[in-house]
Image (cartoon, rainbow, N blue to C red):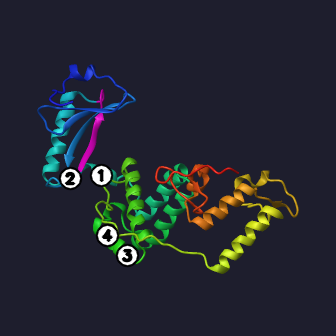
Amino acid sequence: MKGARIIKRLVDGLKPNGSEYFIWDDKLTGFGIRVQASGATSYIVKYRAGSGRGAPTRRVTIARLGKVTPDEARDLARKLLGSVAHGSDPAAERAAERRADTLRELAELFLAEHVEAKRKSSTAELYRDILERLVLPELGNRKAEKVTVSDIAKLHGKLKASPYQANRMPAVVSSLYSFAGKRHFVPQGTNPARGIEKYRENGRERFLSAEELDRLGEAIRKAETKGLPYNIDTSKPTAKHAPKEKNRRTLIGPHAAAAIRLLILTGARLREILHLKWDHAILNAACCSCPTVRPARKPSC
């Protein structure tokens, strides 16, 4: 909402509408009110930390509605904006009082309270590996707000021999700073990984050798006849519920064995095999095809 004069009558009539919205004063640029979906309201100031259009936008809370009058909030906003005009960054100064001291401390908090609590275990392992093996040895002792785009770009360059890891690193750092901004450990909008161009990632392709194919074929034959040894992974939470049997073996069904053989012999993707239909098979040509390209007749068997 724009062009509204922030006065007591406007403040008294504010109500939540189910989503966050802002009201900006029509006289003092940057002075406004934030109304959250929960109904919480506060006077805020919005400004650019620096000069030029590329300078990041910051928001800083002045006070909750009811704690000060609109005129008092306007005077406080005018003072904050005056300090900004002289090179100050109020949001950064406030964040300095509550942020983690170093990037290492911030990373540990990020992993414990965000990644491991909200992401899959495989994702958490990837994030921890990238941070602990690649990022923290280089920048872990640096103050979190002092890490710059130049620092991350330099680290990205060091990893160019491994394009996949090099490209994942800025993404993890960006996620870390997004978390830190929301928790007010660093000023919102701080992201030293922004704008780093990715390396080209070349796909890796490997073919099984004749010996490997023989061993795999023998394993499939054994799995569908005698069965494969069944071993319990005691590291998993469900391990305690698995029956403890000696010499237990697992048989796979003929359809599963056939699907594995098709994957090996055709090089098709897993879902292409699992969703394969008789209409896709061209028996005379000993191949499979999409029916929209080459209709196949249904076998008589």
Measured as percent of width and height from the top left, residue 42 is found at 30, 33
Measured as percent of width and height from the top left, residue 273 is found at 60, 56
Which amino acid type is marked by label 3? Answer: Lys
- The disc label shown at residue 153, or none: 4
Closer to the chain start, of discs 2 and 4, is 2
Residue 79 vertical position relative to residue 220 in the rendered view, above or below: above
Label 3, secondary structure: give it: loop
Task: Name the residue tied to disc 3.
Answer: 160
The stretch in magenta equals 57-67
Q: Main secondary structure of the magenta part?
A: strand
Between tags 2 and 1, which lies in front? 1
In the image, 279: left or right of 167? right
Question: What is the CA distance from the residue labelled 2 to the residue labelled 4?
Answer: 22 Å
Which amino acid type is marked by label 1? Answer: Gly
Q: Are marks 2 and 1 in contact (CB under 8 Å)?
A: yes
- Around disc 4, counting alpha carbons within 10 Å, would you say few (fewer than 14), some (14 to 19), or many (20 or more)? some
Closer to the chain start, of discs 4 and 1, is 4
Task: Name the residue tied to disc 2.
Answer: 49
Residue 203 vertical position relative to residue 75 in the rendered view, above or below: below
